[in-house]
Amino acid sequence: MDSGELIKALELIEKEKGIDKEVVFEAIETSLEFACKKHYGTSENVHVDINRETGDIKVFARKEVVEEEYDRFLEIAIEDARRIDPSYEIGDSIDFEITPKNFGRISAQTAKQVVVQKIREAEREKIYNVFLAKERDIDTAIVQRTERKNVIVSLGKTEALMPYNEQIPGETYNFNDRIKVYIVKVEQTTKGPKITVSRTHYELVKRLFELEVPEVHDGIVEIKNTAREAGSRTKIAVYSQNPDVDPVGACVGPNGIRVNAVVNELKGEKIDIVPWSEDIEEFISAALSPADVISVKITDEEEHMARVVVPDSQLSLAIGKEGQNVRLAAKLTGWKVDIKAQSQADDEYDDDEEEYEEYEETEEYDDTEDEITAEDEEREDTEEES
């Protein structure tokens, strides 16, 4: 690579890769300085200069002007300096050209290495910035391989890591499978950007609905809360400020086409879509879908505790397999939910009524005793007066 080729190459790199050629010039100069010291075994204060117009490369030894010279490699006496230029003063620096005869080969090789390195760094920086903007969003990934239970996926120009704990339980990932992933974290490292993706994150479901439901994408329908047990079931609470828009219907779509698209992407994960409400009793009732609810009563507002009564036939449905339905409803609403069957609630109500009646009878009896005592005391007082 001659001087003219170097200039043309840097101009092309600046145009196509967006790398400032001044940055490359400085990097080449630094690398050549290091190469000179290493190759020629000198401790001189070597300085390399590249002409920005012609690309010519020269090597200089920089010496400081001193009263008396002790190190000829780093210093020059004031008398010798003034023979070169009478205006030199103590403390000035003078550059002496020491460009080696065979320096062209070294400079060409070094320049090439630096340019390649800068191109790699620029590409890494570009990829990092692209995916940093996509952090907390979804992207389409292609499965590449598995490494120690971790899945490596391709995101186009770079690869990403899906750790074992970010994989949906029971889901298999085969080579060239196309899947939607949620970008959890993007980090810059010495080897380039490190991207971590997930299939279990609850936000993945929200982003999928944004893709499938125009009303969600446009903000007409808002997904207020999401509760998810990846691979099994998800509940989402939706709301619309527009009274003409049914938020649940919009997410379900005609014949369930929209929600089914999300379910298919998640390999059959069940999704319950419920209407969000400011009325917490109403919201809890909806969150327990598909079970029917007879009543919801707030038992402790400070601790966010509520008691729910359901028909006897709906108890197991309301609780769900291994308590999943009520657990997800609690996550969705942020309230602890105590579910009772109607017969059980009625029995407890009857018990409470009996206790109350017994208490009332006791109170009446005590009142009678008080009245008798008062009458006796009055009679005794009358007898004493007589």
Image (cartoon, rainbow, N blue to C red):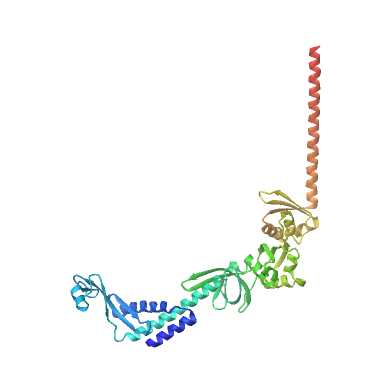
Left-right relation of 242 to 201: right
Q: Position of residue 116 (x, y in %)?
A: 44, 81
Residue 82, image quadrant: bottom left
Viewer-nearest residue: 208 or 317: 208
Residue 280, image quadrant: bottom right
Viewer-nearest residue: 151 or 140: 140
Q: Is residue 9 visible?
A: yes
Quadrant of the drawing holding the N terminus: bottom left
Q: Position of residue 84 (x, y in %)?
A: 21, 78
Quadrant of the drawing holding the C terminus: top right
Q: Position of residue 202 (x, y in %)?
A: 64, 65
Viewer-nearest residue: 73 or 244: 244
Image point 75% across, 67% down: which residue?
249
Image point 48% across, 82% down: which residue?
15
Left-right relation of 359 to 19: right
Total labels drawn? 0
Residue 209, image quadrant: bottom right
Q: Position of residue 281 (x, y in %)?
A: 73, 54
Q: Is residue 233 visible?
A: no
Q: Is residue 31 above or below residue 250?
A: below
Q: Residue furthest top?
A: 386
Q: Is residue 319 above or below residue 198?
A: above
Left-right relation of 248 to 120: right
